[in-house]
Image: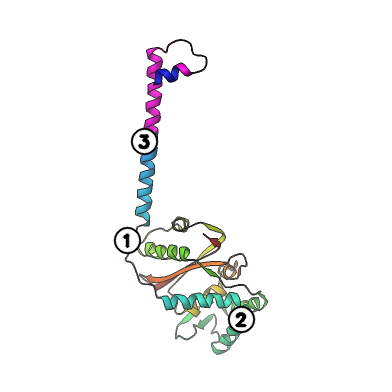
Amino acid sequence: MLKRMYRASPGRTAEPTPEELQELERKAQKAREEEERREEQERLDEERKARAFAAVSPAFEIDDRLLMTINAEINKVRVSPKLYAKSLEELLEENPFSGKTFRIPNTSVTRETQEGEEGFRKTIEFLKGAPRQKMFVHSDGLSKACYDMIRARNAGKAVKTEEYLQQYGTITEPWEELVSYGFQTPEDLVLQWILDDGDSSRRRRNTILNQAIITLGSCVGPHPKLKRQFVAIFCANFS
């Protein structure tokens, strides 16, 4: 076969020498070996990825009621920021700050803040001027990725969010991952994100109110030290 191929080469009239045939065979063998190495590397990469995504922490049952309540609270801010601002004003009247500490609603737990009452009132004023947005569209794929990430983190793994998202679909920017650990109630969780205490960029607040971000997937699960955690992915689209 090599000899026939060699003869078909443009400009060739003489028979190939044994040395030339050996060289062609050597190159063909090298190409086959490189292809085999490439296929083997791809197989190993797939095995490595499968091991990386195999959850080693126990599966857990999602508290659907808690999850729905958290998502509803997030949408409450997004759909009616002015109404949420009014509820914060009432909250401030019922639970005034002591220095930079305030009591978490419906609990006996207090939380220390960096910005104190001033930051709380600035949040209220911001929400009064924020436009209403449509409710988030739920994504099963994003929610599954959040579930997997909770299991991986509970197992002590370093989680690269993009890799988990790729298992279920393609994400469209802009997108953000928000995580909350050890929150007391759904209201407490969302209040933390809306106040965004100590973060001058207000990344969490802006994510929830971003007009370009319309899709949400989330999951709530256990945490080995802080009792529970909530993971949410917000994006323009996920398909």
Q: Which of 89 and 74 lies nearest the eye of the viewer?
A: 74
- Identify the image's colour scheme: rainbow, by chain, secondary structure or one colour: rainbow
Q: Position of residue 182 (x, y in %)?
A: 42, 74
- Bounds of the magenta span? 7-34
- Number of residues whose C-alpha sits closer than 10 Å to that of mark 1, classed few (under 14), some (14–19) or many (20 or more): some
Residue 227 percent coordinates (x, y): 38, 74
Element type where label 1 sits in the image: loop
- Distance from disc 1 to disc 2, alpha carbons, whole Å, reads 43 Å
Q: Secondary structure at mark 3?
A: helix
Q: Which residue occupies the foreground of this view, 47 or 176? A: 47
Instruction: From the image, tell me which residue sits under label 2.
Output: 85
Q: Secondary structure at mark 2?
A: helix
Q: Residue furthest bottom?
A: 94
Could you tell which of marks 1 and 3 lies nearer the N-terminus? 3
Say the numbered circle drawn on residue 56. 1
Percent x, y of residue 133:
62, 72
Q: Mark 2, mark 3: which one is toward the viewer?
A: 3
Task: Give the labeled residue for mark 3.
Answer: 36
**Magenta stretch, main secondary structure class:** helix
The label on residue 208 is none
In the image, residue 1 sits, relative to residue 205, either above or below, namely: above
- Can residue 113 be seen in this snapshot? no
Question: Which tag, 2 or 3, sits closer to the chain's start?
Answer: 3
Residue type marked 3: Glu
Residue 17, above or below 197: above
Picture quarter containing residue 214?
bottom right
The residues bearing labels 2 and 3 have C-alpha atoms spaced at a distance of 63 Å
Q: Amino acid at mark 2?
A: Ala
